Image: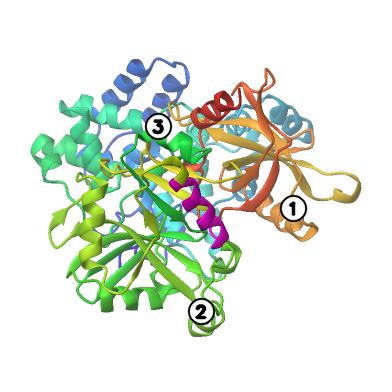
Amino acid sequence: MVGLHLFSVHAAEVLKPAPGVVIEGTVSAFAKFAELGEKLEATRARKTMAALVADYLRSLSEGEIAPAARMVIGRVFPEWRGRPLNLSGAAVVRVVNQVVKTTAEQRQRIASEAVDFGYSVQMMFERGTRAHMHGAPLTLAEVWRAFQGIAVTSGSGSRQRKDEILRELLQRATSLEAKYIVKVAVGEMRHGVSEGLLLESIALVAGVPLELVQRANMLVGDVGAVAEIALCQGRAGLERSSIKLGQPIKPMLAQTATSVAEAFELLGPQLALEYKLDGARMQIHKTGQQVWLFSRHLSDLTMSLPEVGEEVIREVAASAAILEGEVIAVAEDGRPLPFQHLMRRLGRVRDIETMREHVPVKLYLFDLLYADGMVWIDRPYCERFEKLQRVHGNISLVERLLPSSMAEGDAFLEAARIAGHEGVMAKKLGSPYTPGVRGRHWLKIKPAVTLDLVVVAADWGYGRRHGWLSNYHLAARDEESGELLEVGKTFKGLTDEEFQRMTERLLALKVSEAYGTVFVHPEVVVEVAFNNIQRSPQYKSGMALRFARIVRFRPDKAAAEADTLQTMRRLQQAEK
């Protein structure tokens, strides 16, 4: 199986080269990385930002390129390895308070002035009292290895060891370096460099077409590895990039449509409709007798769903394949159960056999990306589905229709709802598979339109909700900048038990607090229903949801998969 190799790390060990990592001769000071961040924060000109990042990448040695490229966009490891640092805002604050002493008055003032968590730490270093800096100036490689050490530390005493590693970093850091250590640690850079802009910078410094870099990133699934290939091997290396079995690629994403009629308008008559199942999307890799199951945000769920892997090995008529499907929980009569039932299976590594009996699941396939040496992502959807029909064996395919009219499509949507499903997907027959891209080739259609939004902050409640974080600040993602912008607040839709669990979850993600509002790392995604979308000068996004209410939590989705401002604007136009 593919995954981050785990081993015990003590603070003194993190300054040693990690096994298999070439870092000899690296001399890039971490201060250069921090200075780059400041330059990026000071500009919004896309070409200037791309040039700044390109110049920085050009200055690095081979062993620094991959970690530096990831850290520029707030990642430490490849995206398919998840976010394994497990450092909450509260944990970071605990360590910062050990390194620098501030008064309650200073902390209150800083909380009111800081625009983000990293900046608040910088101000604490500048205004507080700290001992003299210990040790030589930090290098980029040392910071990266320290993060690696934090990620692999687990078990008894791990909290103390994680604190020690982070404390040793911050004791050697300047105030500006501390700001960016924290920003990377919590994955919140906020300087406007998205993965797309980083790819532009890689193409610029390597002197190759952007499309070549984008395609390599789709196939490799790690922008750090792509940066290293581009800068060290050039065009030839990028052209050799291909899908690797056991290493997931980003899923193709869908936009929202309000009706079958809108789907016909956007996609044209050459489209297919598929039942939209209320389950967990799964990317399935098979080679021989080995199978990997990856979630939509690239987590490895193979151990949690052994019966799915067994069925794939038994049925798929290809020695090597990458398939896409949906796993749903089912009742005794075979009818689909709500997603909350399936949540009991996802990520579980104990009592698997008991859970197989209590929460049976069923796999439905809907796409094929690779089969026996041939990559299919550039082929039209209709051809991919034809190939899937030849290799799926007895595994169920999603219910599918090629509608000849809108009336036929509407009837299919109604049948999906009667069968207990969420709605339908509309897919353009001639469209390629575009990993990680939310294009208009796929549309999700639900009778009641909802949005998947990110909780970025919450207010302490009062009255019956006293002691709970219960008014949630909801944000949508800007496709162009990658920034999360608020579009409303709500406290509606949750039970008392859910308020309590949500409070615990958000406090673990806390990065700062001011005037009764707790700001959190953007990790929690919720599905939100609403009456309409109205203009709002109150929010930078320019939009606000009217009568927003939370329908359910979406632990299967990452913040990067949240619905976008562009989708909201389209829905807003459709309301007029």
Residue 332 % position (x, y):
55, 80
Q: Residue furthest left?
A: 236
Q: Where is 243 relative to 431, above or below?
A: below
Give x and y (percent) for residue 50. Answer: 32, 22
Q: Amino acid at mark 1?
A: Leu
Q: Is residue 186 left or right of residue 209?
A: right
Residue that badge 3 annotates = 266
For image coordinates 56% across by 34% down, the residue present is: 476
The Cα atoms of the two marked residues, 1 and 3, are separated by: 35 Å
Kind of residue indicated by mark 3? Leu
Pick the residue in front: 237 or 157: 237
Q: Secondary structure at mark 1?
A: loop
Q: Quadrant of the C terminus?
A: top right
The quarter of the picture where the N terminus appears is bottom left
Question: Is residue 415 one of those drawn in magenta?
Answer: yes
User: To which residue does mark 1 refer?
Assistant: 494
Please name the amino acid that badge 2 sits on: Arg
Answer with left or right where residue 112 lies relative to residue 209. right
User: Which mark is first along the chain, 3 or 1?
Assistant: 3
Disc 2: which residue: 350
| Residue 109, above or below 252 | above
Residue at x-position 47% and y-position 52%: 412
**Residue 315 seen:** yes
Q: Residues within 10 Å of mark 3 (few under 14, many from 20)?
A: some
First to last magenta residue range: 408-422
| Label 3: element kind | helix
Specify the principal SS of the magenta part: helix
The answer to whether the residues at label 1 and label 2 have Cβ atoms under 8 Å apart is no
Query: Between tags 1 and 2, which lies in front?
Result: 1
